[in-house]
Image (cartoon, rainbow, N blue to C red):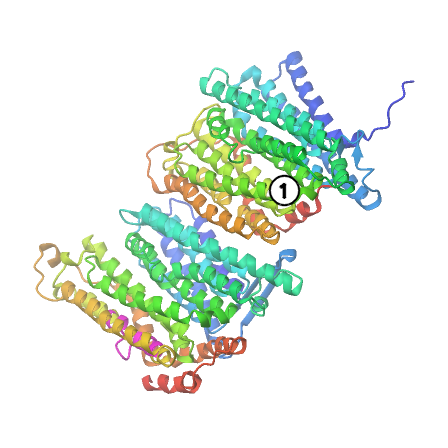
Amino acid sequence: MIATPDVSWIAILPELVLALGAVAVLLVEVQWKPATRVLGVISAIILVVAISFTLLQWIQAGDALEFGGLGTLVAFSGMVVMDGFAVFGRFVLLAMTGLGLLAGWKLIESLNRRGAEAIALVLLATTGFSIMVASNNLVMMFLGLEIGSISLYVLAGMTREKIKADEAAMKYFLLGSFASAIFVYGVALLYAGTGQLEILAIRQFFTEFFVTSPAVILIGLALIIVGLGFKVSAAPFHSWAPDVYQGAPAGVVGYMAAMAKIAGFLAIARILLTGVPQLDANWLPVIAGLSALSMLVGSVVALVQNDVRRMLAYSGVAHAGFILTGIVGGATTGMLFYVTVYAIQLVGAFAVVAVVSGPGSSGSSIDEYRGLARRSPALGAAFAVLLLGMAGLPLTSGFIAKFGVFSEAWANGYGWLVIVALLASVIAFAFYLRVIVVMYMDETEEEAIPVSVTARWVLGIAVVGTVLAGILPAPLIDLAASAFPL
Amino acid sequence: MLTWLIALPVIAAVIVALVPKRLKELHLPLGIALSVLPLALAGYVFWIFEPVAGYQFRQQAVWYEPWGISWSLGIDGISMPMVLLTAILVPISLAASTSITRRTKEFVVYALLLEAGMIGVFLALDLFLFFVFFEAILIPMYFIIGIWGGERRVYAAMKFFIFTAFGSALMLAGIIALAFTHAEQFGSASFALSDLMNLDLATGAERWLFAAFALAFAIKVPLFPLHTWLPDAHTEAPTAGSVLLAGVLLKLGTYGLLRFNLSLFPQASVDAVWIMGTLAVIGIIYGAVVAIVQPDLKRLVAYSSVSHLGFIVLGTFALTSGSLQGAVIQNVNHGLTTGALFLLVGMIYERRHTKQISDFGGLQKVMPVFAGFFLFMVFASIGLPGLNGFVGEFLILIGSFTTLPALTIVAAVGVVLAAIYMLWAYERVFTGVPDKEENRVLSDLSIREISILAPLVILVLVLGLYPKILLDKIAPSTEAVLDHIESQTEFVIPEPGRLGDVFVAGGDQE
């Protein structure tokens, strides 16, 4: 009998299900060539199973926090952890995958036989990002990042007959790999400085030793921040985002953007808050600076965009800044809440883009939205709610999210950042409203746009989620509060 | 009960929204009928309102415990008149909107949601809740201006939104700061107004916070030099939008100054008396002078608002019994008279499709009833004794004289200027011979239009002849504000400025 190593499989069960599921989808496609609908059902089952395992993890993590200690939570010789933070992140990632598949379903159907590839890539991307948020080892984190990112590069070029999509995919790939390389170099320098790759061990290192000249460590940390800053499109590392959002097929942009952001922010938080909290005097000002720059650059440049997708990309830059204020606050509750509600809004907004411009389209001029509220009142209203949610109007989740991260930053002594953030929010109102103006205040003679059932579901969930989390935020905040990293 | 005041308009909006599109004619009447319900409830609240200090009909439910936010409502003598005014103006402005034939359903829905938000602002006793309503109002108003407004409606709507959002952003920073100061001093964050009034703020911090709040409210009022959004918004908004904007939305600013600035930052308020008073007086004179030269009737009324609201701010910061009561009642008065003037301008615009004063002349002969109503409201606006405007301005001026004599004298010039721009406009529009062909065929007011204006005329008369009905209920609450300031600072309200004297002043008019 072969001796099996004693490993806690439960720590990676969702990823196992996802990865095997991706393979299964491809094999089923090759063997039986089923209707796309069947593949949809299969991927739904895979997601449901993965989510169930995540819930199981949540229960287990809760128990372990109560009875065990750190030891029971770290699995695979310190490679992955199973703390509330990872489980929460994984849960959000899986939920967004579900929404993303629904939102992109039209695109997947239009790809015919290559639809299976798209589904498999989506599942693989989720696997990668899911590992990334759960990793305790920086190399493991890099691995997850790459599995996820490479899947996204391919997804961006899925409609390969479209030259715009190819261009977007190429840009995303080149700049993305460059950023990944920078991240890895940062990891190497951090390793050189501390001799550790495990995030918990790095924290331990700083409690045990006093580093007199931490130059190498700081440079490493800076490079890691740059690499991840690229992934979450924080200024000044954001220049890829508008082009990629514009060029990639509308059906997958929301998913792509949401996944990279969720995983990226959670990784930044884990490294900075869990790994090197002792160095916060060094990294807090840097993150605060990035945050302020992102908010201002994102809001101001979004004002002059004539393509809704570029506008959403720059608004994403601004949102990156807002979310970073939560990290400046030194806490993860507000940040987790923000990332969650923003991801939902993002997927919802791009679902609208996919409906209006067509699922495989590249580019969405603001003119396409002229009089949308007259043509398709429900679609216009949904987009308006999502945009106002992103803008952070009270009674939407966006307001609670902003309020949460700003309060944390304020409590941590970064009042100036909060004031910059509030002013940036006002600027942001202007460009969100511009789309609403075009939708509501311009007339059009064009006919209503047909909205597919899947898109209806996505929009329904996104709108209800945005309003509900804005009026009754307590359950989600409590969940986020209990999901702190180790 | 207060929750119902907010819920009723929302429910009404939902009902209207559910009426299918093909029953187009039904939306507006249904909206008007449903908006009478909150009015009835507000009237009932007024009826059983006890003339004592402190909040009545309190309602409290925890919203999110760790942040210390709660659904906390209450009404006192300062907010009660405002709630009543809101409830009165919404059905009237809806009834005056028959000219809106395009997208009627949406219009009614937005107006009703706006009503819910406005009432919410006046009732909220939790700063977080207050801010939620304060911001939420912007969206329906933005749509009302932007969809049903005039030529440059999109520009005006955007300007309105960005100006106000800018102010409230800084106020939000102030609110967060207050909540955290509470957490530092008492161990837990709280947004309740009653908790935050007990904070022990350092002088510097208090001044900054005062400035953050004052900026938000000053933009809303609007106080000189932050008024530039107002003429655009007013001119471009549809009639109902202008009525609600002038009648209620501007009052959010004066109400906020009175409710939050004076109570939360007593020391800073006392220190800022001169600054705020001076800005108010500049606004009074500036608004009046600019109003004189306006060629557009609606713009003229808009600038007259800048002037009138200057009086209210002056009264608020003069910090005497008379001036505060005057400020509160002038809030109501201005809502009624300016609302009526905007309605009248809207009625003539529907007939002639112009608001330029030079396009009119001699209308008195053609439309005697219209001219009568207009003249009545002009008199109410410039403060003819016996009408409501007199009560408010007189109380403010006499109350302010004890603490800010110099400014009050200058402000009094504004009363004269008001007579100039109002009567001159009246002269150019109504007197003389109707020399333009188009003006000769204008029809006079219909029964419907008269019945829209009649309630306002009655209220103007009632408040002008017997202001005690409202003042008795206002006075205890404004006294409480002054007591709070006196207990927190070394400021002593001069003896003639205290209660007894005012009732003599009030008695003069009875």
Q: Is residue B160 above or below residue A117?
A: below
Residue under the point 56% across and 61% down: B178
**Which image quadrant is residue B284 in?**
bottom left
Inspect the magenta stretch and tell me whether residue B382 lies in it. Answer: yes
Which residue is denoted by mark 1 in the rendering?
Answer: A282
Spot occupied by residue B248 in the image (x, y as percentages of width and height): 39, 63
* Stretch in magenta: B378-397
Q: Is residue A236 left or right of residue B447?
A: right
Q: Is residue A22 left or right of residue B345?
A: right
Quarter containing the C terminus of chain B? bottom left
* Residue B473 can be seen, yes or no: yes
Q: Is residue A461 above or below residue B425?
A: above
Q: Is residue A265 above or below residue B37?
A: above
Q: Nearer the viewer, residue A185 or A127?
A: A185
By secondary structure, the bulk of the magenta-drawn segment is best described as helix
Residue under the point 52% across and 27% down: A251
